[in-house]
Amino acid sequence: MNVNYDEIKKDLPSEQLIRLFMAAGWCKGEITQEQKENFNIGFRNSTYVVSAWEDNYLVGAIRVISDTIFRSVIYDLVVDPEYQNKGIGKELVRRCTSKYPNSEWLVQTTQEVYNYYEKLGFKVKEDVFLTKESKYF
Ligand SMILES: CC(C)(COP(=O)(O)OP(=O)(O)OC[C@H]1O[C@@H](n2cnc3c(N)ncnc32)[C@H](O)[C@@H]1OP(=O)(O)O)[C@@H](O)C(=O)NCCC(=O)NCCS
């Protein structure tokens, strides 16, 4: 297995992203045509994107919205199940935190995954988290 990392490309192919998100269970259920067409918009409009590839096959991705100095937020860390437990997720996170090394890093995640981030040095914060829901997912 030869995985290459791309830190330049933000315009990841939507079809590959959908396949990746579905396979990893990060996206469930029906996707509308509008969502399909705009699936990569979160990546295109993020501050920093890292993707992992085996040849032309997208095996992992992560995106960051950051002011580049003080605060950075991780979204959509996903690794293809066939490629999990090989250090790809860790490498994607490492590249992000190295990019803005003095920043505070934030991530909202699930009960199933927060231990993963703890292993990577993140700490659970007891702050109140408020939200207004998106029309999408
Ligand atoms: C979470 C995820 C990105 C990890 O990617 P990965 O490439 O398999 O992870 P790595 O290979 O870098 O790390 C593997 C290590 O993390 C551990 N790990 C994997 N998933 C974990 C979890 N949910 N909770 C705690 N530890 C976990 C493994 O046991 C392994 O530990 P070890 O190094 O001590 O053996 C991947 O499982 C995934 O895509 N999950 C579905 C999407 C998701 O939940 N994303 C989080 C978005 S915030």
Image: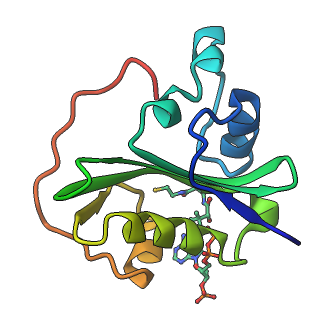
**Is the residue 87 above or below the residue 51 in the image?**
below
- Left-right relation of 23 to 65: right
Where is residue 94? Give x, y as percent: 48, 73
Q: Is residue 25 rendered to the left or right of residue 105?
A: right
Q: Residue at x 77, y 55 (%)?
A: 53
Residue 110 placement, left or right of 19: left
- Relative to 91, 13 lies left or right: right
Please provide percent x and percent y for residue 17: 68, 38
Residue 104's place in the image compared with 26, above or below, is: below
Residue closest to the eye, 83 or 11: 11
Q: Which residue lies at the image location 60% right of the left edge and 38% below the top edge? A: 27
* Snapshot quadrant of residue 4: bottom right
In the rendered image, which quarter is residue 108 located in? bottom left
Query: Ligand 1: which quarter?
Result: bottom right
Q: Residue at x 45, y 22 (%)?
A: 136
Q: Position of residue 29 (x, y in %)?
A: 64, 29
Instruction: Give the image location of residue 114, x and y in percent.
Output: 40, 68
- In the image, 104 versus 134, the foreground residue is 104
Q: Is residue 53 above or below residue 123?
A: above
